Amino acid sequence: MKIATFTTFFVLAGAGAALAAGSHAGGHDHDDGHMAGHGHAEMMQVGRPGAPEEVTRTIEITMRETNDGEMLFEPGELEFEPGETVRFRIVNAGNVEHEFVMDTLENNEKHRKLMQKFPEMEHDDPNAIRLARGGSGEIVWSFANAGKFQFACLIPGHMEAGMHGPIRVAKN
């Protein structure tokens, strides 16, 4: 009887480890109860995916490295008003793969730690995009809640090399 219980536990524990090693496509639980992934339009603390017809302005974001090893975003900080819907046109002008992820500081830190364990994780989160060298893409996003948030590249070592910046959402 004890062997069967141990075997059942071992099989279930092994299945959990296999799922954790998978992609972002299944999503992560966020502190706000939102399960990111598969393009869910559910509200997150940082906002929600926006509709193209709601866009009020377009922001060009460039991801790159410097000759001294720094990795950065241009611009380095972002500011919006609650309810504003923005189209981000994102270009990887660097020599390596980068990503752009918007979330709370706490959620980005949890995500960064998960990425350290599983660096080849694939993304399918509506608040993020991962681009190969020379790649480009778009995110349309509605900032619903006032507050301080963050954008970052959570690929291991990139945030530490400078790839992060603040997002402020406040009424002007």
Image: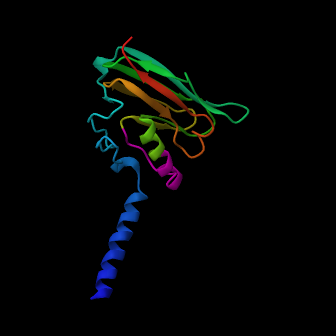
Q: Quadrant of residue 52?
A: top left
Instruction: Give the magenta part as a residue range.
Output: 112-125
Vertical order, 97 against 47 (above or below): below
Query: Which residue lies at the image location 42% right of the left edge and 41% below the top edge?
Result: 107
* Residue sticking out furthest to the right: 68
Query: Which residue lies at the image location 44% right of the left edge and 22% below the top edge?
Result: 168
Query: Which residue lies at the image location 61% right of the left edge and 34% below the top edge?
Result: 162
Q: Quadrant of the N terminus?
A: bottom left
Vertical order, 92 against 158 (above or below): above
Residue 17 in picture, x, y percent from top left:
40, 64
Question: Per the image, is 7 magenta?
Answer: no
Vertical order, 76 against 101 (above or below): above
**Left or right: residue 94 compared with residue 101:** right
Residue 86 in picture, x, y percent from top left:
38, 20
Q: Quadrant of the C terminus?
A: top left
Residue 155 in picture, x, y percent from top left:
54, 44
Colour scheme in the image?
Answer: rainbow
**In the rendered picture of this protein, how many numbered marks are placed on residues?**
0
Query: Which residue lies at the image location 31% right of the left edge and 40% below the top edge?
Result: 32
**Left or right: residue 42 compared with residue 120:** left
Residue 111 in picture, x, y percent from top left:
45, 45
Q: Nearer the viewer, residue 126 or 169?
A: 169
Q: Quadrant of residue 134?
A: top right
Question: Per the image, is 121 magenta?
Answer: yes
